Amino acid sequence: MGADYVAGVDLGGTKIYTLLATTEGTVKAEAEVPTEAGRGYEAVVERIAETVAAVAAQAGARPENIRAVGVGAPGPLDPRTGIVHQAPNLGWKEAPLRAGLEARLGLPVRLENDANLGALGEYAFGAGRGGTELVYVTVSTGIGGGLILRGEIYGGAGGGAGEIGHITVVPGGPRCRCGSRGCLEAVASGTAIALRARELLDRGAGGAAEAITAATVARAAEAGDPEARAILDEAAWHLGTGLAAVVNLLNPGLVVLGGGVMRSGRLLWERMDRSLREQALEASYRQVRLVPGALGARAGALGAVALALRAGLSIDFGKH
Amino acid sequence: MGADYVAGVDLGGTKIYTLLATTEGTVKAEAEVPTEAGRGYEAVVERIAETVAAVAAQAGARPENIRAVGVGAPGPLDPRTGIVHQAPNLGWKEAPLRAGLEARLGLPVRLENDANLGALGEYAFGAGRGGTELVYVTVSTGIGGGLILRGEIYGGAGGGAGEIGHITVVPGGPRCRCGSRGCLEAVASGTAIALRARELLDRGAGGAAEAITAATVARAAEAGDPEARAILDEAAWHLGTGLAAVVNLLNPGLVVLGGGVMRSGRLLWERMDRSLREQALEASYRQVRLVPGALGARAGALGAVALALRAGLSIDFGKH
């Protein structure tokens, strides 16, 4: 016999990060490998399977004791059919990831949008434990989000709910990769912050042609650089505008903010909160708590574990 | 014995509109009286009670056969305690409307936000029948909204969810009565459309100093007036921006649009749809149906009937 385990996989454009956990959610092993998406869909499926085998071996788990695998992938995808409709980072279109992995692993696989799994991870194991409602927002190279309503992922009609990154916050603003203009992601993501800083340097405002990131800008702002401060303030204001739309629309009790950019310092957080306060309805602002994510970069993989646990447990109930 | 009935009340700043319906939701009688809020809270409670008695008498129902009363009131309010926190139109603060009406009527009373009841009405008896999810938006003097998620009103932490009218769509735009700037309501409500038209006339662009409304503007636009057209187009574009935020965030399958402004012609609708298409994520746009409300101005009172039916039926189950 031996203990039962589930695996959680966070599939990204550059890396695959996989956890093995007990049915109580205790992490026993983890592994990270480059995705190498250029080698094609079949190769990526194989790589994911290898990470699952690797974490099982690390934890000393027998293959038959792994009950289920949860996978978070960039959307849009359909959790019911397990098909990834479109993943530009991976070069995929209509990829049957769930069926492919189930065939390769001989295990039940559940697939979800990575931002939804970030929400589920924080809900099950992180900053949202104990409640039933949670809005999760992640600000890193892009801006994503997921909703937990009444204790479950709320995906809407097609699993795409939670896309706060594509709310228009600057009408007629910069073009977004989604095709629209002035989306929150186009003006407040890590990518957008770094781009603004590089534009400023290119115009000769000083500084070296180094690899500028949102973290560089945040550090310069905290150190007192007025131009870095202005860039950060503007991005933070836009984040508050997007959050205000969420707060007015859902009146959430809890918003969990994850992603690298949210960990870039107090200035961003304070300015974002002020923007939210000015633009949200007073009663709804009073009722919401904004908290940083508790799981860091592991939120998605831990959400995949939670997804797998639910799937795995229901399969258990069916068998016994 | 005799049949059982429930009453639905739509309490507004200028009028009280009350329906009596069977437990199957068939409307048997209706009544409308001026609110006369200036006479105070007690007088309004008395007036509501009188309308309930009036519709009962009209339908030939005995008082003991009325099982419950549902009331929609302007928010913010707390459905659980039955207290209206603040209703500027009525001059109320912390008014215990549910307890007051229950004492006066000797009947179970359920209270909800009027926009949430518009959503519930369309869901139970109107354009949303048969589904489980619905976003309701009403555009009249103000802009309100309500959410039905998984078959129930979704109120969020404090019952205030669905406030699409206060999403920022024009950053730094006109001041809204909520205190913020550039809210959807401040630039696309019937009040905002009429105000823009009056400003234009005051600047001497022509026309008489008549009482201009959003309906006047819509008629002039349909008749080919370029300035009326421009005003309507702008409001419609903003409506699409607000809807895009909702569509990106909730990925709804159905959005029901009610309120007088939405019945003002095809031009507004088409332009709004185009704005939505440009600003919503493609997959989410494809999955949403926008439909006009099926219940017109009765949506809120019919939602109150649905609320009362649910309350009344559960009380029945308890008694028998």
Image (tube, coloured by chain):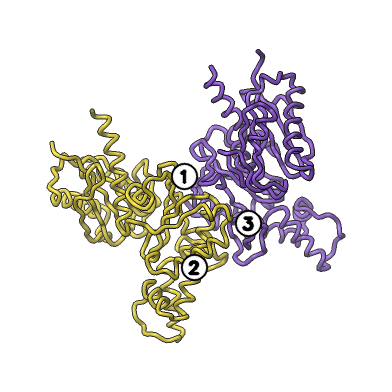
Chain colours: A yellow, B purple
Q: Position of residue B58 (x, y in %)?
A: 77, 23
Which residue in the protein does label 3 denote?
Answer: B184
Under mark 2, the amino acid is Arg
Q: Mark 1–mark 3 contact, CB under 8 Å?
A: no
Left or right: where B230 falls relative to A317 = right
**Nearer to us: label 3 or label 2:** 2
Whether residue A37 is situated above or below residue A209 in the rendered picture = above
Q: Nearer the viewer, residue B277 or B42?
A: B42
Q: Position of residue A235 (x, y in %)?
A: 48, 69
- Tag on residue B70? none
**Nearer to us: label 1 or label 2:** 2
Q: Quick one: which residue is furthest to the top in this view?
A: B1
Query: Helix, strand or loop at disc 1?
Result: loop
Residue at mark 3: chain: B
Q: CA distance from mark 1 to mark 2?
A: 31 Å
Which residue in the protein does label 1 denote?
Answer: A156
Q: Is residue A85 visible?
A: no
> Does mark 2 fall on the same chain as mark 3?
no
Q: CA distance from mark 1 to mark 3?
A: 23 Å
> Does mark 3 fall on the same chain as mark 1?
no
Which residue in the protein does label 2 denote?
Answer: A271
> Does mark 2 fall on the same chain as mark 1?
yes
Q: Quadrant of residue A108?
A: top left
